C-alpha cells in the first residue's frame, strides 16, 4: 500500500549519541491509521546494531512507504536516502503538504492522499474540465484554484498546451493572493506555538507555489503558441503576486524550495519574453526589476540575468532610459547610458568570479573587452586583465592581451616590454600576432624602428608558411619601420636607399591588401614626404573613398597635400567639407588647419577669428567631463588649449602686435604649473625664459618676439634652453644657426654644424636649407650656397602648412 506521512525534520542533521552520521536505518511497524494522519507521529527507527531511538522530534520526512522493512541511510546533509541513492527529502526541507502530479506513477498526491491520474485524464479527454476539477477537489480535499492548477499542470505536461490554457484561464489569481497574503506575511509569535504555525505556514506556501506555478505555466503556454505579449503579461503577474504576498521581499529562510524555484524562473523568463515580443523598453525595466528587487535569487540565476542584461545593453541598439527613482538609492551611482550600465554589470560579474561566487565565463571578459574598447578605456581594461586570477589565462596570452591594452592607452614602452617577454625564445617566439603588434609599436618610434624591422621580417617569414593572408600586414609593418629608420640614418645615401626600400615594401603590401584603408593612408603619407604629391593625392582620395570620409586624418592629409601644391583655396574647401561631416567635439584639428590656411592666404584677421572659435571649443572640452573620462588616453586628433594660445601668440608676433602676443603667452603660462607666477611679463628676466622653454621647447612665439625686437641674447638663451630638453627639435637648431650666422665669421662653423644637424633630422625642411645657403654664402662657398638655395626653392613649392607626419 502506498501512503504519505509527515514527520518532523530540522534543517540540520540531529546529533544523537550512538547514531553515526551515516547509519543504516530500518523502518519498524507504524501505528494503525497512519496513512491518513496529518500531524507529526512517533515512529521507531532501528539501527543496524539493534539500538532503538525515538526520532519523532528530530526528523521530518516526506516518504513513500512501500514495505516496512526498506533500507534507508541518513546522510551528512539531513537527508534520508534509500540505499539505492534515491532521495525524498532535500536539505532544509520542512513539514509540508505536497500537491504533485507524479507522471511516473500516474498519480495525484496531496494532503496525504493519492489519486489515480487516469481517472482525471479520461474526463479531460472527454472535455469535461469541470468534472475533472470536481474529482480532484473531492478526492484530494483541494480548493478551486488548487484543483485547476493541478489540472492545468497535467495538461501542460501531456503537451496539450491549448487545453492547459483553457484550464488555467479559470484561476482567479487575485482571489488566491488575498487568501494567501495574510498567512504568508505573518510569522510565528512564540516558540510554544511554532510547530502548528510552521505547519500552517508550509501549507500556505505550497498553495502559493501551486497557484503561481499555474500562472507561470500559463505564460509558458502562451510562449509556445507565439503569443509573446500575453506570455509576458502573465509572467509579470506572477512577480506582481509575489510582491503582494511578500511585502518585504522573499526571506532567505522559511521559503519552500518549489516556491523559490518558480519565482526564479519567472524573474529570468520575463525579460526574455519582452525581448521576443519586441518590447525592448519593457525588457530593460524587467531586467532592472529582476536585479534590484529582493527576489532571493541564487548566484547562478543572478549571474545569468546580469550577463543577459549586459549583452542586451551592448548590442540591442536601444538607448535605455535611466532607472526610475524608485530603484535609485541615495548617494548611489546611476549609469548615464547603455555603455556605462553594461560595463558596470560585466565588472560585477568579474568581481563575483574573483570572490568565488560564480564559475569563470570567458564570454564575460570578451563582452567587457568590447565595451571598454568602444569608449577608449583600454587602460581600465588592462587593470581588469591584471586582476584575473592566475591560471585562467596562459601567461603568454595574458602578456599579449595586456600589451594590446597598454598600446591602446598610449603606454607603448610597457606594451613593448610585455611583447618582448612573450616573444622570448623560451616562450612563443613565433607568435604571429605578437610579432605584428611589436612591429607596429616600433614603427612609431624612429629609435625602435630597427628592432621593429626584425619583428616584421620574422612575421613575414612565418606568414608565408602558416598564414599567407597576413603577409601583407607584415610587409606593411616592415615598410613603416623602414620609413622611420631612414630618419636616423647618418648618411644621405643610406637614408635615400632605405626610403626607397620602404616605398617598395609598401607597394608590395598593397598587392596583398589592396582594400586596406590604413595601408592606403600610409602610402599616401610616404609619397607625400617624398614630395611625390600626385601619387600622394591619388592615395589620399582613395583613402577617403574607402572610409566614406568618416576619418578626420584623411581629410587633413588631403588638405595638406593641396597646400603643398599651393592650392590653398581648394585645401580650404576640403577643410570646410570635412568640418560639415565632423561632430563639433572632433573639429579641433580641422579648425587649426583652417586657421593656418588663412594665414597662408594672407588673411590674418580671418585666422584670428578661426583661432578664437577653436579656443572656445577646446575650453569647452576641457571643462566637460564625459561619461568615461577616467584616465587620459593618447589621441593625436586633439588640440590642447596651450597650443591654441601659442598659435595666436605666433600670429600676433608676426603682425608685430607685441602686447597681444604677451597676453596670449601669459594665458598659456597660466595653464601650466610653476610658470604662471614667474613668466607674467615678456621676459623681464631671461633666465626665467630659459626655464620656461626648457619645459616647453616646442613653442617659438616668444622667441621670435624677442628676436624681432632686437633682444638677440635673450632669444639665443631660450633656444639653447629648449635644446637642453629636446636635442632633436629642428626649429630650435635652425634658429640657433640663423642667429649664430649673424655674430661674425667666427660663429659660422657653429651655425653650419647646427643647420647640418637639422637637415640630418629633417632633410625636407626648406628653412634649414635656406639658412645653410646663407652660411655658405657668407663663408664664400658660392657653389654650395647655390645648391642649398635651389633645394630650398624646390621644397618651398611643395611645403605643406603642417608636417605630413602630423596626420599619422
Image (cartoon, grey):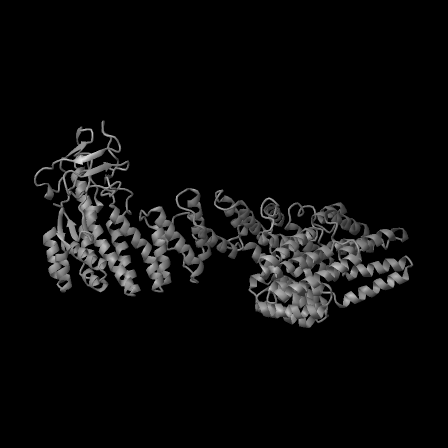
Residue sitting at x 64%, y 56%: 461
Between residues 584 and 173, which one lies in front from this camera angle? 173
When the figure is inspected, residue 563 is found, relative to residue 381, above or below; the finding is below
- Relative placement, left or right, of 670 versus 346 is right
Between residues 467 and 233, which one lies in front from this camera angle? 467
Q: Is residue 730 visible?
A: yes
Task: Say which quarter of the image contains residue 765.
Answer: bottom right
- Relative placement, left or right, of 104 versus 555 is left
Task: Say which quarter of the image contains residue 33.
Answer: top left
Position of residue 518 measured from the top left corner of the image (x, y, whole percent): 61, 63
**Figure quadrant of the N terminus:** top left
Residue sitting at x 78%, y 62%: 766
Q: Residue furthest left?
A: 32
Position of residue 549 measured from the top left corner of the image (x, y, whole percent): 58, 68
Q: Is residue 520 visible?
A: no
When the figure is inspected, residue 501 is found, relative to residue 405, above or below; the finding is below
Between residues 429 and 314, which one lies in front from this camera angle? 429
Position of residue 476 measured from the top left corner of the image (x, y, whole percent): 64, 60
Position of residue 521 measured from the top left corner of the image (x, y, whole percent): 64, 64
Q: Residue furthest top?
A: 17
- Relative placement, left or right, of 593 versus 11 is right
Residue sitting at x 25%, y 48%: 258
Amino acid at each position: 500500500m502506498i501512503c504519505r506521512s509527515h514527520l518532523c525534520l530540522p534543517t540540520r542533521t540531529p546529533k544523537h549519541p550512538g547514531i553515526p552520521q551515516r547509519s543504516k536505518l530500518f523502518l519498524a511497524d507504524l501505528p494503525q491509521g497512519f496513512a491518513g494522519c496529518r500531524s507529526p507521529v512517533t515512529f521507531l527507527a532501528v539501527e543496524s546494531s539493534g539500538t532503538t531511538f525515538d526520532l519523532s522530534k528530530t526528523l521530518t520526512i516526506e516518504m513513500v512507504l512501500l514495505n516496512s522493512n526498506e533500507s534507508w541511510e541518513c546522510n551528512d546533509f539531513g537527508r534520508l536516502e534509500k540505499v539505492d541513492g534515491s532521495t525524498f527529502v532535500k536539505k532544509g526541507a520542512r513539514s509540508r503538504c505536497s500537491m504533485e502530479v507524479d507522471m511516473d506513477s500516474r498519480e495525484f498526491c496531496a494532503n496525504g492522499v493519492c489519486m489515480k491520474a487516469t481517472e482525471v485524464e479520461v474526463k479531460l479527454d472527454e472535455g469535461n474540465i469541470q468534472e475533472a476539477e470536481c474529482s480532484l477537489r473531492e478526492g484530494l480535499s483541494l480548493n478551486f484554484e488548487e484543483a485547476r492548477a493541478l489540472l492545468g499542470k497535467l495538461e501542460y505536461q501531456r503537451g496539450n498546451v491549448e487545453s492547459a490554457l483553457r484550464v488555467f484561464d479559470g484561476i482567479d489569481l487575485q482571489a488566491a493572493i488575498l487568501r494567501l497574503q495574510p498567512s504568508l506575511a505573518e510569522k510565528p509569535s512564540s516558540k510554544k506555538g511554532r510547530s502548528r504555525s510552521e505547519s500552517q505556514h508550509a501549507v500556505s506556501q505550497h498553495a502559493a507555489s501551486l497557484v503561481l506555478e499555474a500562472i507561470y505555466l500559463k505564460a509558458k503556454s502562451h510562449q509556445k503558441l507565439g503569443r509573446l505579449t500575453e506570455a509576458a503579461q502573465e509572467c509579470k503577474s506572477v512577480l506582481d503576486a509575489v510582491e503582494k504576498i511578500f511585502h518585504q521581499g522573499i526571506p532567505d529562510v522559511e521559503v519552500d524550495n518549489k516556491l523559490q524555484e518558480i519565482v526564479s524562473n519567472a524573474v529570468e523568463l520575463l525579460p526574455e519574453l519582452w525581448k521576443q515580443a519586441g518590447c525592448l523598453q519593457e525588457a530593460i525595466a524587467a531586467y532592472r526589476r529582476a536585479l534590484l528587487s529582493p527576489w532571493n535569487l541564487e548566484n547562478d540565476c543572478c549571474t545569468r540575468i546580469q550577463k543577459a542584461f549586459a549583452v542586451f545593453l551592448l548590442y540591442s541598439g536601444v538607448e535605455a532610459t535611466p532607472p526610475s527613482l524608485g530603484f535609485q538609492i541615495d548617494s548611489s551611482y546611476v549609469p548615464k547610458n547603455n555603455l556605462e550600465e553594461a560595463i558596470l554589470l560585466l565588472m560585477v560579474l568579474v568581481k563575483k568570479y574573483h570572490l568565488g561566487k560564480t564559475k569563470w565565463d570567458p564570454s564575460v571578459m570578451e563582452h567587457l573587452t568590447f565595451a571598454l574598447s568602444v569608449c577608449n578605456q583600454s587602460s581600465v581594461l588592462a587593470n581588469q586583465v591584471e586582476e584575473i586570477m592566475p591560471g585562467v589565462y596562459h601567461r603568454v596570452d595574458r602578456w599579449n592581451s595586456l600589451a594590446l591594452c597598454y598600446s591602446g592607452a598610449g603606454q607603448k614602452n610597457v606594451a613593448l616590454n610585455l611583447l618582448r617577454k612573450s616573444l622570448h625564445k623560451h616562450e612563443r617566439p613565433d607568435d604571429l600576432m605578437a610579432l605584428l603588434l611589436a612591429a607596429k609599436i616600433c614603427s612609431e618610434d624612429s629609435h625602435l624602428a630597427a628592432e621593429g624591422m626584425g619583428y616584421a621580417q620574422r612575421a613575414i617569414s612565418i606568414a608565408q608558411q602558416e598564414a599567407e593572408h597576413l603577409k601583407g600586414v607584415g610587409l606593411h609593418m616592415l615598410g613603416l619601420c623602414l620609413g622611420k629608420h631612414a630618419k636616423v640614418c647618418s648618411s644621405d645615401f643610406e637614408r635615400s636607399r632605405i626610403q626607397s626600400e620602404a616605398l617598395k615594401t609598401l607597394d608590395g603590401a598593397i598587392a596583398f591588401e589592396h582594400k586596406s584603408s590604413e595601408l592606403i593612408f600610409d602610402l599616401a603619407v610616404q609619397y607625400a614626404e617624398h614630395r611625390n604629391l600626385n601619387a600622394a593625392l591619388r592615395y589620399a582620395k582613395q583613402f577617403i573613398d574607402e572610409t566614406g570620409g568618416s576619418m578626420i586624418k584623411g581629410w587633413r592629409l588631403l588638405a595638406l597635400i593641396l597646400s603643398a601644391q599651393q592650392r590653398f583655396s581648394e585645401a580650404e574647401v576640403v577643410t570646410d567639407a570635412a568640418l560639415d561631416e565632423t561632430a563639433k567635439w572632433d573639429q579641433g584639428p580641422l579648425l587649426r588647419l583652417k586657421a593656418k590656411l588663412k594665414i597662408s592666404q594672407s588673411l590674418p584677421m580671418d585666422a584670428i577669428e578661426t583661432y578664437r572659435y577653436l579656443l572656445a571649443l577646446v575650453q569647452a572640452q576641457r571643462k566637460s567631463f564625459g561619461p568615461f573620462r577616467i584616465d587620459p588616453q593618447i589621441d593625436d586628433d586633439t588640440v590642447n588649449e596651450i597650443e591654441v594660445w601659442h598659435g595666436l601668440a605666433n600670429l600676433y608676433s608676426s603682425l608685430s602686435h607685441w602686447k597681444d602676443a604677451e597676453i596670449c603667452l601669459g594665458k598659456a603660462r597660466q595653464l601650466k604649473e610653476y610658470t604662471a607666477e614667474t613668466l607674467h611679463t615678456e621676459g623681464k628676466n631671461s633666465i626665467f625664459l630659459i626655464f620656461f622653454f626648457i619645459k616647453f621647447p616646442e613653442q617659438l612665439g616668444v622667441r621670435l618676439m624677442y628676436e624681432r625686437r632686437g633682444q638677440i641674447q635673450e632669444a639665443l638663451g631660450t633656444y639653447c634652453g629648449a635644446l637642453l630638453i629636446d636635442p632633436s627639435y629642428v626649429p630650435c637648431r635652425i634658429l640657433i644657426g640663423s642667429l649664430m650666422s649673424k655674430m661674425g665669421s667666427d660663429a659660422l662653423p657653429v651655425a653650419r654644424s647646427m643647420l647640418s644637424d637639422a637637415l640630418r633630422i629633417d632633410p625636407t625642411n626648406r628653412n634649414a636649407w635656406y639658412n645653410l645657403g646663407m652660411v655658405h654664402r657668407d663663408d664664400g662657398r658660392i657653389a654650395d650656397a647655390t645648391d642649398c638655395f635651389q633645394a630650398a626653392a624646390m621644397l618651398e613649392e611643395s611645403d605643406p602648412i603642417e608636417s605630413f607626419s602630423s596626420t599619422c
